[in-house]
Image: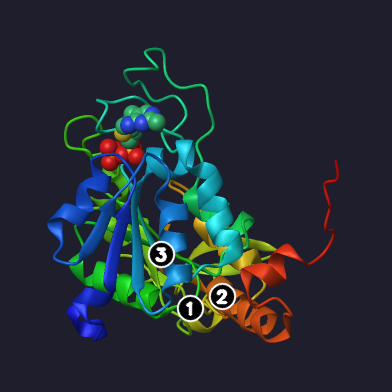
Amino acid sequence: MLPETGIDKDKVVFVSGIGCSSRFPYYINTYGFHSMHGRANPIASGIKISNPNLSVWIVTGDGDSMAIGGNHFIHTIRRNVNVNLLLFNNKIYGLTKGQYSPTTPKGSVTKTSPEGTIENAFKPGELTMGAQGTFFARTVDTDPRMMKKVFTAAAEHKGTSVVEILLNCVIFANQVHKDITGKEVRDDHQIFLEHGKPMIFGKDRNKGLMMKCDRMEVVTIGENGVTEDDLIVHNAQDPDDTNHYRLVRMELPEFPVAMGVIRAIDSTVYESEMFDQVQHAKKETKIHTMDDLLHSGNVFESKG
Ligand SMILES: Cc1ncc(C[n+]2csc(CCOP(=O)(O)OP(=O)(O)O)c2C)c(N)n1
């Protein structure tokens, strides 16, 4: 997918934190930076701000970006730095051998929760919306066609593009997403959203999402007079995030899990605004040399 974006590979940087997922920069033939646990976001932000011509990708795990790096995650999104963030969500700390993470479902038995976790799990999409995110998409690692579509949209988006990728840790959280991604269930348990298209899903393409009294509901086309025209048409570009919130929260068994680009709205990006401010400050300033600087403002003279 990267070669098809037309971006020269010398202009691409992959920045990761720590974790199995964060080993990614070694597997790709571009520049890369395997950094510190939870700190990929500030490093990637610095790279992008100092050299906006680069295509900057962050690769992170659910532990790396939702726990130790949770603060950096929300602030990168709030600033809308033009970077792409691939969040490998296996719902466990893999590298350190199976401790629960902030996305581990409540009640899960893990190495650090022998009686089941007693914490509510984060949904990365909810955090993205809460941080005023301009782009959120979800995909599955076993669906290369879906991944390609979603990554291409992320690359094209101007702002922080958050992509949640559902995948297994084959050792410590094997089949963790099987109810969503399993071959026999995936058509009925996922809905692939496309901007401007009605929200249809199901093996027989006869199920859909409809608004009923301020609530989203699953309906069957052909039952109770429901037709395709009654379904919600996906508007990923709606600045009002109410429906996007509804979509990222959907979970089994009541709803299918939303895939594809859920939100992609236009907004200003951090590094452009910073560039404009720096240019303006340079033009207006009376300080051009170190001497000017030392003699500007309050100057104290030491006598005695
Ligand atoms: C400052 C610091 N604290 C803790 C660790 C130990 N540590 C390494 S990876 C990791 C969790 C990784 O989990 P996740 O981001 O979900 O990645 P995965 O291995 O599952 O891909 C932890 C706690 C560390 N390397 N550095």
Say which residue appears at 35% left-offset and 20% top-offset. 109
Q: Position of residue 288 (x, y in %)?
A: 65, 78
| Residue at mark 3 | 47
Q: In which image quadrant can residue 287 be found?
A: bottom right
* Residue 10 vs residue 203, the one in the foreground: 10
Residue 60 numbered mark, or none = none
Q: For the residues marked 2 and 3, what is the alpha-carbon distance in whole angstroms?
A: 14 Å
Which mark is nearer the camera, 3 or 1?
3
Q: Which residue is mark 1?
A: 158
In this view of the protein, which residue sits in the foreground, 287 or 200?
287
Q: Where ligand 1 lies, by image quadrant? A: top left
Residue occupying the point 57% across, 81% down: 266
All told, the count of numbered labels is 3
Mark 2, residue position? 269
Above or below 31: residue 197: below
Q: Which residue type carries mark 2?
A: Val
